[in-house]
Image: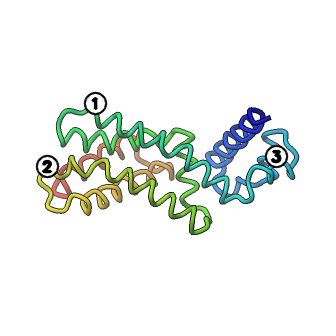
Amino acid sequence: MAEHRRMQRDALLEAARSLLSEGGTEALTFPALAERTGLARSSVYEYFRSRAAVVEELCAVDFPVWAAEVEAAMERADTPEAKVEAYVRQQLALVGDRRHRAVVAISAGELDAAAREKIRAAHGGLITMVVDALEALGHDEPRLTAVLLQGVVDAAVRRVELGAAEDPERITRAAVSMVLRGVGG
């Protein structure tokens, strides 16, 4: 019975990822989840009490995987500058990944305070990954610099997600250049 419940929960999360990546937060409804999984709408409520609970679970499952991919890319880099570049590039490479698209859609959604705090904490963990590299590059305030660097990444992610006129690789190059060289070029 426990295995069946786990499989149903996994199917619901997969359906939620699809709905979020296809149609954003508006598409994530319990009737849509029920339709995608073949469950009765009332059965969806047995697994999740609200849309926020679905979102919270997705973040708990998907964000660590995403963060591990960023961390692995940074570990493959051999200089602090290369680590910072890997941090930016890997996050932007993940934009097309359904897990990432779901997390982006989630971040724009209406969440309760507990869910928002969990997402903030997870995001803080991502930012912490780049602090040592920034410190090695000589930044006096590496934590603040990491937060600002993440702001550049977030802006580039939004630009790619919007389907901007620029090619995603061009956006990535611009973000890497801004992070590594500032607006001086």
Q: CA distance from mark 2 to mark 3?
A: 51 Å
22 versus 139 height, above or below: above
Nearer-the-camera pick, 62 or 86: 62
What type is the residue that disc 1 sits on? Arg
113 versus 162 height, above or below: below
Residue 35: quadrant of the picture: top right
What type is the residue that disc 3 sits on? Ala
10 Å crowding of disc 2: few (<14), some (14-19), many (20+) = some
Image spot of residue 18 (x, y percent): 66, 42
Disc 2 marks which residue? 137
Disc 3 marks which residue? 34
Q: What element does badge 3 sit on?
A: helix
First in sequence, mark 2 or 3: give its number.
3
Residue 76 badge:
1
First in sequence, mark 1 or 3: give its number.
3
Nearer-the-camera pick, 28 or 121: 121
Q: What element does badge 1 sit on?
A: helix
Residue lying at 14% horizontally and 49% vertically, measured from the top left: 137
Extreme residue in the left direction: 138
CB contact under 8 Å: marks 2 and 1? no
First in sequence, mark 2 or 1: give its number.
1
What type is the residue that disc 2 sits on? Leu
Image spot of residue 145 (x, y percent): 24, 59
